Image (cartoon, rainbow, N blue to C red):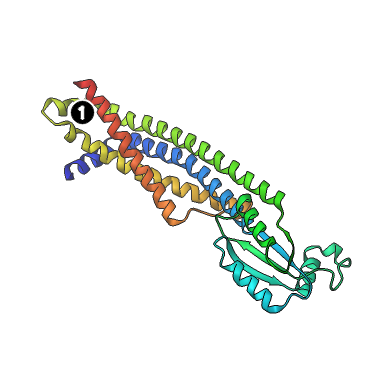
Amino acid sequence: MRLAVREAMLAFRRSPLLSALSVTTIAFSLLAFGLFSLVALNIRSALRSVEERVEVRAFLVDNTPVDSIAGLMEELSKRPEVQRVEYIDAEQALVRARAELGEFKDVFEAGFLPASLDIRMREGFRDPAAVQQVVEQVRLLPFVEEVRYGADWIEKLHRIRNIATATGVVLGIAFAAVAIIIISASIRMTVLARAREISIMRLVGATDAFVRRPFLVDGFVKGVLGGLLALLLTWLARTVVSKSFLEVDFFPPSIAMLGVAAGALLGTMVSSVSVRRHLSRLK
């Protein structure tokens, strides 16, 4: 392995321009995929923040006993679909309505709005079917006069999320395929440039494993460097967008390291395939 690492470093020194071209090609291939992934990540975050507003509002009959309200809240809180339950009395409902609809605040009068239980849904249970199931069960509870939850809004939100997920998967696969093709062509150029060296090594009795090892190290190093460069460029793009247009979230450290590891894996795998093909032609 030490010899393989030394040979890979010598290859960098012998052809620095070709090595730099390979690293840059890998970086820009991964950059395209990284930028798309960053957009998909922020769209998902935006949808998640909107989904957090999915709630069921159960209006209570007038003069519902405090003990009954506490019992309803305890019963609802035990449900796996429910994240939290909040009691809104008539006065709080009036204040909230005037704040949310400021231009119509004079329309609302004291005692106009009933008390309610606001039921926030837990993540994973915010789709129309899960919300509808909770609504049907809440309607059967005592002291509940009416239940509202914005069925059309939840249905549209769920449809948008499904479309965004499907589009993200399809485009992600397409970008990944393009990146693999470009990286493959780049590393194959390196292998072809060292074809004479491979032939000489074969003539002096080097095994296929011995011949492949320096190229695998070379592909691994180029993949890591390309991944780090792509990560840096993605971060710079995110910084420019955040300062000029709107705040954009960046990848968490685990995802960022996974991207670098993906570059290393792609570089190693493509080098292995390219060398194997070239060796098979020499037999």
Left or right of residue 280: residue 258: right
| Number of numbered markers | 1
Residue located at (18% from left, 34% from top):
209
Nearer the observer, 62 or 270:
62
Residue 176 in picture, x, y percent from top left: 45, 37
Above/below status of 182 relative to 238: above
Q: Nearer the viewer, residue 100 or 204?
A: 100
Residue plotted at (62% across, 55% down):
133
SS at circle 1: helix
Q: Is residue 131 found left or right of 59 in the rendered image?
A: left
- Asked if residue 54 can be seen in this view, the reply is no
- Tell me: residue 121, above or below residue 29: below
Q: Which residue is mark 1?
A: 198
Image quarter of the C terminus: top left
| Residue 57 placement, left or right of 172 | right
Q: Nearer the viewer, residue 77 or 276?
A: 77
Q: Position of residue 30 (x, y in %)?
A: 44, 41
Q: Residue furthest left?
A: 205
Residue 124 locus on image (x, y percent): 55, 55
Res 196 → quadrant: top left
Residue 62 makes an appearance in the image: yes
Residue visible at 56% across and 39% down? 167
Q: Position of residue 165 (x, y in %)?
A: 55, 43
Q: Amino acid at mark 1?
A: Ile
Crowdedness near tag 1: few (<14), some (14–19) or many (≥20) residues, C-alpha within 10 Å = many
Quadrant (top left/top right/bottom left/bottom right) for the N terminus: top left
Q: Quadrant of residue 143?
A: bottom right
Q: Tell me: residue 163, above or below residue 257.
A: above
